[in-house]
Structure formats: structure tokens, C-alpha cells
Amino acid sequence: MKAIKLLVAYLLIIAITPLNAQPGTLDNSFGFEGKILDNSIWATCRVVKTQPDGKILTGGYTDTISQQNLGGLFIGRYNSDGSIDENFGINGKVIIRKIEGALPIYVQAIEILKDNKILACGRFVTKPPYGGVGLLRLFPDGKIDSAFGVNGFVTTRLSKWNDIIGGMVVQADGKILVTGNKQSSFSQPGADFMLRYMPDGNLDQNFGVNGVIYTTYNSNVTPGAVILQSDGKIITGDIYGASILQLQLTRYNIDGTLDESFGNSGIARLLPVTGNFSSLNDLTIQDDGKIIAAGQYGIGSMLVARFQIDGQPDLNFGNLKGYAYLYTPGTIAEAKNVFITKTNKIILTGSYFNEKDKIAVVRFNENGLIDSLFGENGIAPGNINNLMGADVTSGEGALQNDGKILVSGSFLQNDDDTYNVGLFRYNGDDPERNKYVRIKHWLHHHGISWEDKPNNLINYYSIQSSTNGNAFTEVERIYSNHNGGIQTYSAANNATANYRVAAVSNTGNITYSNTLTLVNNTPNIQLYPNPAKNNLQIQGLPAGTTKLTVTDISGNTRIIATANSTVYSINIAQLTSGNYLLHIKTANEVITKQFIKE
């Protein structure tokens, strides 16, 4: 009898123990079978944001069936399980149709402030039919914060035509940046703008001229995104050009001046191999400082591209010298957001229109190649009840802290008049199955490093390399010391290759790290004459500032100099005759060369 009870208990445990969800499948703990359709209001969604407590914010445009074009903006909030948060606003929604002097049209960006207040940015019409920049701030419960701006709102109009918003970010000091483009005439782009507001909503008079900075370019620009680096520098993303459309990044210093060390005098561009880039909608930054851009290639392909930290296109990314795009026959797709997971995978969310689907999540490996282990060959599409249509605003997304992925859709109902917001949640990497190893670039070395956690039951680490990112070969084994610390591996040569680490446990189980590409950026530096008497010429230095240190063989520092060009002459007349070492500190490593003083 006891044995039977134990068997029943065992079977019950099996029945209620969830299996590890496959990345790219719908999360059945969210809504109904991983999705919800909110028919409480007529609305289209333009932004999704997660709060620190796991609740989900949406924002966009709302209207009514009976009174078309009597619209306004909305912000909605959902609990983490997809149910409407009835404690937010009125029945889970904040709807604003009119304020003094302006008509709010839609919300385009949302930021959660340090005090958990909600800051929203969107299009406000002050002189119909043309619109400008609008901001509003809410308390965490959805009530308007009247201490911000004028009764909770701020409106800014720069052009007598339309001001097209690119994005909004909040700086570490609480100041608010809004970027975009000031139209020069009807539907014609003009100069890009960057507005900076104080935390209370007033324009920052110490920024540019009366709180605004303009940047003009030699061709048309369409604004798309803005992001902050960890050092506070500002990067904006645009589409640039009139005939051949390019991706454009512009980097500014904290004070709004162009960062001349980035790209070409502060501006970096990526030219397509063929065709055109159609949109740039979002930016994100990797741990190593590289910049990922997402948007659309051609008329129907999701696009992802990568730039080096200095603005140069990362030619080792993707299969098209800096970018990759996903083309699906019969589908018109566009990436709206891009995220980097804790395992360095690249997530795109976007619209994905065909006869069956309306939205999709796509995952790429760190090298820009599609991750076939996610969803179905890298793609996880979605729809709700085979609804007949969806608005182009569909595809906005958010990455939760647990790795799950949210995507919105603006779905047209069968009456051809009603739009409702839908939300999907997909499983990402299971946080309970985090990889033992997350490798990083080894600073100042052509190699990798990772944390060897104490008591992690790892026997050894297999360092593996690949030239194509697919077929990996073991090049070295490093055994765990079980006491914790940082492990490092230096590549045997400076060739460009992909590396990963396989953590092999004491029982033989294997988990793989992320993949990193080590690029041969070592400059070909030459010293002449060698031996030298009075002056040593150094040729082939990297562009920018390079620190030079001369030491004797015992390691004593004799000369310190700074080079600002690729060729430099260092005066060694004061040195006594003998052997010396020249240490050249570049952005990636320290190169040591030996010379003889006559």
C-alpha cells in the first residue's frame, strides 16, 4: 500500500512539474495560451514598456467607433499575467483627448523614472493639423503629476510644419532628451533637433540655444532612435540619403557638441551592398560598446546592423559586411525594437504581415547570423484568432528581466472599424538554465575572459574556435580551480575567428557560452632606424591618441609620450646605449617592440 502511495505521489510530481519552455514558443502563463486581446477600448499601440515590478505598460492612439477622429492618447497597464491592472488610471487606462492649447494624438515613447513615475512622449497638435513634441508625467497609479510642466504636460513646437519625433531618453541626472527632425516644408525633412528638458519639464537653457540643438546634413534624414552610452554620450539613429538610403548614427558629447572621435567628425554611415535601407527604428549597445541598429531593408525585410564603438561598420557582423536581413517570401516585415539578452543573443520584434501572421520575434546569434534554435529556424511569428488585419504600428516589443519577450499588435476587428491592442509573450532563455560561462573580450589582449565561479562543479573549460561561426574545434582545455576567479585565454595568433567556451561538468554535462568574434585589429607598427641614435621613428600607429612608454629591460620607465597621428618621432638622445622596450597602448591592447639605442 505504501509503495502505491509513493508511486501516485511520484506521478503527481511529474504531472505538475513544468518542462523547460523552448525559446521562441508562446508563454502559456500569460493571458490565454500566451496572448491577450484587449477590447476594452479602440486603440493602436506604439510602445511597450515593462516596470521593475513586472507590470506592463502600453501606449499609443485611441479613438471611438461612433466619433471617428475624436482621438487622443492612451497609456494602459497590465499585470504580469496579462490581466488588466484595474488599479491604474480608470479601469487600467489613462486616456487624454485634450489639454489647454493642444490636442494629444498618441504616445510614442515611455520611460520609468527612478521614483517609479511614468514619463511619456508623443505627438501633440498645437496648431492643427501640424504637430510637435509633447510630454506628460504620471504618478505610478496613473494620476497626472501636476508638478511637471504646466499641470503635468509640456508642449514644444519648433517648425510651422511637423516636428517628427525620433525618440526619448532620460539622462542619469534626470534631464530628458527628445530627438527628431524639424520639417522644412510640408512633408520635407529639415534639420535634426535635440531638445533637453530639466526634470521639472522646463527646457534646459544651458543646452544649445534655449534648450535645443540642431544638426544639418547634406541630404534628407528620417529620424528613428536615440540611446545613451554608459559614459553619457548620446547616439541618434537616422535614415540618410535621397537616392541610396543609408543607416546613419550621430554621436554627441554630454553637452550636445558633436563627438569628433566618432565616425567622420561625429557621423557614421553604413551603405547597403545593394538596394536600400528603408527605416532605422531602434538602437541598443552591447557590453563591449558596439552599437546595434534595427529597422527595415528594402520593402519587406527585418534588418539588423552593427557598428564598432568608434562608428565604423562592423564588417564581421552578419553576412553582408556589417548587416543582415531576414527575407520571407510573401511577407512584409519590419523590425521595431532590438534587445540583447544575457547570453548576448540579439532579439528583434516587429511587424510580420502575411496571410497567416501579423507580428514576429526573430533571434540572431552575436555574430549576426540567424539563431536556428529559436522558434522555427530563428522566427517566432504570431496572430490572434486569424483576425483579418493589423495596423503598421504592430510589432513594438520589450524584453523582460526573466528573458521573456513581449510583442504588441494593433488588430483590426471584423467590422473594419475597430482596432484593439493585442499582446504576446514568448519564452526566451530559461533563467534557471543560465550558462555557466559568459565570455567577454580580454581587455588589452587578443583573447577572452570569463568568471570561474567557486564550487560550480565544472571539471574543465573547452576553448573552441571557428572561422565561420558554425563548426567549432577545441583549441585548448583549462581546468577549473573550484576556488573562483577570472579565467583567461589568449589566442595563439592574431587571426580573426569566432570563439566560445564549453563548460564540461564533473558528470560530463556540457553547457556552451555565448560566441565572441576576435578581430585582428593589431596595427602593423614599424620602428626605424633600429638601432637608433637620437630619434626613433614609429610608423603605423592607430588613428587617434596613443600612449607611448619606453622602459629599460628591467622595467624602469625612461620616457613617456603621447602620439596623435599614425607617424611619430620620439627623442631618445638622453638614453644611454643599450636595449629598450617601447610599449604602445592602443584601444584594444598593449603592443611591445624592442629597439637598440646606439
Image (cartoon, rainbow, N blue to C red):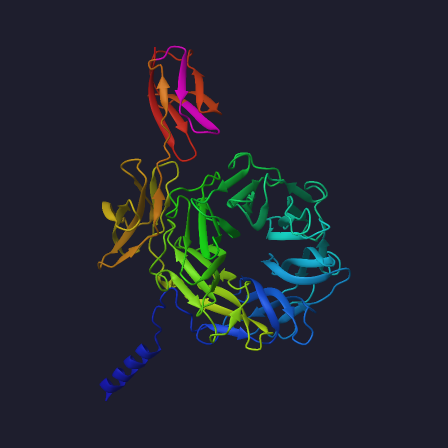
What is the total number of numbered labels drawn onto the structure image? 0
Quadrant of the rendered structure where residue 48 is? bottom right
Q: Residue at x 40, y 27 (%)?
A: 584
Q: Is residue 588 magenta?
A: no
Nearest to the observer: residue 3 or residue 508: 508
* Image-based side of 448 in relation to 289, left or right: left
* Image-based side of 186 in relation to 242, left or right: right
Nearest to the observer: residue 319 or residue 561: 319
Quick one: which residue is furthest to the bottom in this view?
A: 1
The reply to whether residue 214 is visible in this rendering is yes
Image quadrant where one finds the N terminus: bottom left
Nearest to the observer: residue 205 or residue 375: 375
Nearest to the observer: residue 256 or residue 456: 256
Q: Residue at x 40, y 52 (%)?
A: 344
The reply to whether residue 148 is visible in this rendering is no
* Range of residues picked out in magenta: 532-549
Residue 208: x, y in percent?
A: 68, 40
Q: Residue at x 35, y 73 (%)?
A: 18
Residue 193: x, y in percent?
A: 64, 45
Image quadrant where one finds the C terminus: top left
Question: Relative to 488, does residue 551 appear above or below in the rendering?
Answer: above
Residue 411: x, y in percent?
A: 54, 71
Question: Relative to 539, does residue 173 appear above or below in the rendering?
Answer: below
Q: Is residue 543 magenta?
A: yes
Quick one: which residue is furthest to the right in this view?
A: 100
* Image-based side of 480 in relation to 451, left or right: left
Question: Relative to 127, does residue 475 appear above or below in the rendering?
Answer: above
Residue 235: x, y in percent?
A: 55, 45
* Image-based side of 454 in relation to 340, left or right: left
